[in-house]
């Protein structure tokens, strides 16, 4: 573990040094210079407000992991902590695609929103929603049909794989709904609505996952299954709540603005 930690620090240091050297070289259109490093309060505020979403997601993920491991140790022992580690590893890998699609869409949504090309913003939201739902459905099918081989990619212990097969089907039961959460949050971030994005991140992770992880294992003798059930339940509630809020506060209003622009006579836009 110590070696892995040292390797992580070294790799991060090397990547940071490489990035700085590149950004200060003549290969980039805008070079980093000391004269350009003066801080602007307004710009820092905007960066911070948008970055808080990612921070909250990372921080709450660590909190969820700590609470889940504690509950699994109390109700199932170290074996189920290993099962959860394997499942979260699978989750991180498969969710990377959704994260890449939604994060890549954010600047596109923001640019077109600023340019008042609202029909393009709506098209972008529709695109990321359909792609993420389609991808997450394929992932769900694979995990439901082949849980054993997928878990073995991360841990080959026979006892752990046996326990992980049923746990994975519970944990990923509603994985498709994660696409709604990701699409909704990325839309909020892309349009500069950081407060909504942070709210729904905290709602799902802290308000739902942590609360359910503490509560469900004690109900109806669910035990460790209650810990794994917290994720699919929070996916449905958090995903639907986030996406519906985004739809009614963003998409509906953008459609109204688009219709208003289309209906206005030529020359009255100014």
Image: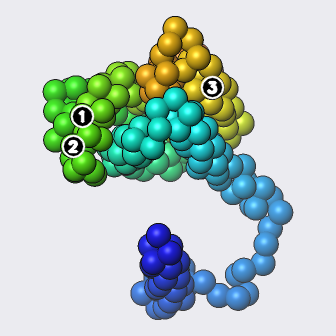
Residue at the disc numbered 3: 214
Does residue 58 lie above or below 198 as drawn?
below
Q: Nearer the viewer, residue 36 or 167?
A: 167
- Which residue is at a point 50% across and 50% down the rendered structure image? 107
Identify the residue shown where x is 49% and y is 21%: 223
Image position of 204 with respect to 114: above or below: above
> Who comes first in sequence, dot 1 or dot 3?
1
Crowdedness near tag 3: few (<14), some (14–19) or many (≥20) residues, C-alpha within 10 Å: some
Q: Which mark is in front, 1 or 3?
A: 1
Q: Secondary structure at mark 2?
A: helix
CB atoms at circles 1 and 2 under 8 Å apart? yes
Mark 2 and mark 3 lie on one chain; the one further toward the N terminus is 2
Considering only vertical position in the picture, is 233 above or below 28?
above
Question: Which label lies toward us, 2 or 3?
Answer: 2
* Residue 4 image position (x, y, % from top left): 44, 73
Label 3 sits on a secondary structure element that is helix
Identify the residue shown where x is 24% and y is 48%.
Answer: 157
Q: Check residue 244 in the rendering and tell me which mark sits there, or answer none.
A: none
Closer to the camera, 145 or 216?
A: 216
Q: Is residue 131 left or right of residue 109?
A: left
Q: Label 2 to label 3, Cα distance in Å?
A: 28 Å
Q: Nearest the camera: 83 or 38?
A: 83
The disc at residue 162 is 1
- State whether residue 147 appears in this view: yes
Report the Cα–Cα distance between label 1 and label 2.
6 Å
Residue 248: quarter of image: top right
Q: Which residue is mark 2?
A: 158
**Alpha carbons under labels 1 and 3: distance apart:** 25 Å
User: Left of 12 or right of it: where is 163?
Assistant: left
Q: Residues within 10 Å of mark 2 (few under 14, many from 20)?
A: few
Disc 1 crowd, CA 10 A, few/some/many (<14, 14-19, 20+) = some
SS type, badge 1: helix
């Amino acid at each position: 573990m110590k070696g892995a930690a040292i390797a992580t620090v070294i790799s991060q240091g090397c990547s940071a040094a490489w990035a700085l050297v590149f950004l200060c070289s003549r290969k980039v259109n805008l070079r980093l210079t000391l004269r350009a490093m003066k801080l602007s309060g307004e710009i820092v505020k905007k960066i911070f407000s948008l970055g808080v979403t990612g921070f909250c997601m990372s921080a709450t993920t660590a909190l969820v992991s700590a609470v889940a491991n504690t509950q699994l140790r109390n109700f199932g022992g170290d074996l189920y902590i290993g099962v959860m580690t394997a499942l979260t590893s699978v989750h991180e890998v498969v969710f990377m695609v959704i994260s890449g699609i939604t994060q890549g869409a954010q600047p596109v949504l923001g640019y077109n929103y600023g340019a008042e090309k609202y029909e393009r913003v709506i098209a972008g939201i529709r695109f990321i929603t359909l792609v993420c739902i389609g991808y997450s459905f394929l992932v769900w099918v694979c995990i439901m049909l082949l849980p054993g081989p997928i878990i073995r990619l991360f841990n080959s212990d026979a006892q752990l794989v046996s326990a992980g097969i049923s746990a994975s089907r519970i944990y990923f039961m509603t994985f498709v709904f994660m696409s709604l959460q990701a699409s909704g949050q990325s839309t909020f971030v892309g349009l500069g609505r950081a407060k909504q994005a942070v709210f729904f991140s905290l709602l799902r992770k802290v308000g739902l996952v942590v609360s359910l992880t503490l509560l469900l294992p004690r109900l109806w003798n669910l035990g460790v299954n209650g810990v794994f059930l917290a994720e699919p339940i929070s996916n449905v509630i958090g995903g639907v709540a986030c996406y519906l809020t985004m739809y009614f506060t963003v998409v509906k209003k953008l459609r109204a603005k688009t219709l208003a622009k289309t209906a206005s006579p030529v020359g009255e836009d100014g």
